[in-house]
Image: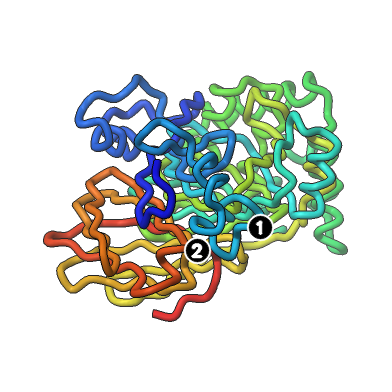
Amino acid sequence: MNTGSAFYPIFPALKDYAWGSQDPEGAIADLLRKNTGGEIPPGPYAELWYGDHPSGCSLLPDGSALNEQIAREPEHILGPFAKQGKLPYLLKILESQSPLSIQAHPDRELARTLHDRDPEHYPDSNHKPEIAICLRPGFTAMAGFQELSRIQQNLTRHPELQEILPGLLESNGNARQALKQAFEFLYRLPGHKIEEIARKLHSRIEASSQKDPSDSYFLRFCQLYGFQDPGLFSIFLLNLLQFHPGQSLFMGAREPHAYLQGAIIECMACSDNVVRGGLTPKFVDVDTLVDMLHYRMGPPDTIEPRNQGKIRIYQPPVEDFQVWTMETGAEGVTLPRNLFPVIALSLSGTARIQTENEVFELLPGRSVLLPAGSGNTGGGYSISSEQKADLVLAGPGQPTNL
């Protein structure tokens, strides 16, 4: 592709992880169908990656990789991020019909340590804070530890848990320390002991006519992952959350979470570092997970978007990324210069993206990279549409001045 362009159309990398959606009418299948004009590969449809991460790099129209184009012209595409040689963020569309693993992400210091020690399982030396924005009704997640009083209620309601989570029911001192000790005790139990307790609890819950959502998820976890996974009991320790479209969840470093089902817009620092602790056949690193968690209890962090007309701006407390969702029309929007480089994705409708000298039509389901070299000079970019178009934009996490 030619250098110095104002528009770099990109095609996302599709991930077909086993937990992905099989729904041919789902969010990812819909975007794929718009991209291809009709034909789509068989599922599962787990994630679409928009960015230059080597584990799932977007492609340009000529079939070359986006990271190769960035290497040819880092100053033009990346602007102030040219020295690091890559985009500071990674944008995804994620859709699951089965739970993702229980996981946490390292901060920068721990990420460097893990990468140096085990680059096979920790391919990046960067941290991985992330935001999940509900895209369609039905997004459900576990995130952050419940308040101690709620965990104690679960232990009282399910006495079987008291044997594998010792010290929490009677804890009246350092709650975080008690939680860490109990969590570590659970995760270091032999498989046969976990199975013994899990089967007892499963039998009693299954026979009960009064099941709450956490009970139902426990039964589902057992069906999916068997009875020897310590992550089965996470539903009684972590907050169970349901979201409406537009609501968000922010996961900083060292916070446990698992997305259970649904479709989201996800944006994160450009990293693929995941410390897993259960509900997965993949590599699990119990030692690191137990030691790294904050054991903070209470509701997890959310990001309330700042509304500017039909634009919603999600600005997490990190420098790596921010996300805009917008509904465009004939009136148009001018993008601020400190937002670039930007990746823009049309969820629906056709948008008209314009510089002083060029016009680009962003078709439904398509995406484009807007480089810093064009966005930070001249008249920048404006976005409009003849009819309604719903867009997602990702850019560096710098303050915006609309």
Q: Is residue 248 visible?
A: yes
Name the quadrant containing residue 118.
top right
Please state which amino acid type lies under the numbered disc 1.
Lys
Q: Is residue 212 visible?
A: no
Q: Secondary structure at mark 1?
A: helix
Is residue 99 toward the left or the right of residue 134 in the image? right
Is residue 44 toward the left or the right of residue 110 in the image? left
Q: Could you say which is closer to the camera, residue 5 or residue 319?
A: 5
Is residue 190 toward the left or the right of residue 338 in the image? right
Is residue 81 toward the left or the right of residue 166 in the image? left
Q: Can you name the residue that lies furthest to the left here?
A: 386
Residue located beneath label 2 in the image: 322
Q: Residue at x 40, y 41 (%)?
A: 1
Residue located beneath label 1 in the image: 83
Q: Residue at x 33, y 69 (%)?
A: 311
Q: Where is residue 85 drawn, in percent x and y? A: 62, 51
Q: Tell me the mark number nearer the camera, choosing from 2 and 1.
A: 1
Please state which amino acid type lies under the numbered disc 2.
Gln
Q: Where is residue 220 drawn, in percent x and y? A: 52, 29
